[in-house]
Image (cartoon, rainbow, N blue to C red):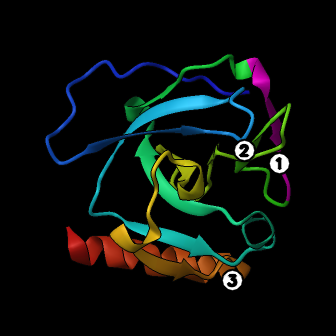
Amino acid sequence: MIEITKNQGTIANTTIQVTGGCHCGAVRFIAQVDPKQTLLNCNCTLCSMTGHLHMMAKHENFVLHTDKNNLISYRFNTQKAEHLFCSQCGVKSFYQPRSHPDSWSINAHCVTGFKKEDWQIETFDGQNWEQAKAKLNKAKLNKD
């Protein structure tokens, strides 16, 4: 399943703290995220069905505050992404995406106090995943 570890280092001043979780409260987390990141609205079969709006948090900046046994894992297609759902209410508040192997993808809709208008949102063409990932990588290189 997953290994979730507490942050061992210092967090740069360029992050903000977010909290969130599932509908019933069996899954709760706290994370440090870049407030300037662009959230990804993916149109793949799973994200479009579940309404997952991707907010990335590095593994070392994410802490699960509830028992990881409250999560059920689901994999499909390439088996690289690990989709994690609350075993009680079924909400996917975060998961391990294949697009960002060093980060958790938090569902922004599951973040306490989330306001869509406070964030830049970009479409990620998950129906054409390889091309969309290449475009994302190219944009990241140009940004750095």
Q: Quadrant of the C terminus?
A: bottom left
Classify residue 17 as left or right of residue 44: left
Q: Look at the numbered discs 1 and 2 and tell me whether their residues touch, using CB distance below 8 Å.
A: yes
Q: Earlier in the sequence, mark 1 or mark 2?
A: 1
Q: CA distance from mark 2 to mark 3?
A: 19 Å
Answer few, some or many: residues within 10 Å of disc 3's Cα (few below 14, many 20 plus, some between 14 and 19): few
Judging by the rendered image, the residue that carries numbered circle 3 is 128
Q: Secondary structure at mark 3?
A: helix
**Residue 123 falls in image quadrant:** bottom right
| Image coords of residue 48 (percent x, y) | 75, 73
Residue in the image at 34% along x and 68% along y: 118
Above or below: residue 121 compared with residue 114: below
Three-letter residue code for mark 3: Asn
Above or below: residue 63 compared with residue 129: above
Q: Earlier in the sequence, mark 3 or mark 1?
A: 1
Q: Nearer the viewer, residue 89 or 79?
A: 89
Three-letter residue code for mark 1: Arg
Judging by the rendered image, the residue that carries numbered circle 1 is 75
Judging by the rendered image, the residue that carries numbered circle 2 is 82
Q: Quadrant of the N terminus?
A: top right
**Residue 28 falls in image quadrant:** top right
| Image coords of residue 98 (percent x, y) | 62, 55
Q: Earlier in the sequence, mark 2 or mark 3?
A: 2
Residue in the image at 51% along x and 70% along y: 40
| Image coords of residue 68 (percent x, y) | 69, 21
Q: CA distance from mark 1 to mark 2?
A: 5 Å
Q: Secondary structure at mark 1?
A: loop
Above or below: residue 127 compared with residue 24: below
Q: CA distance from mark 3 to mark 1?
A: 18 Å
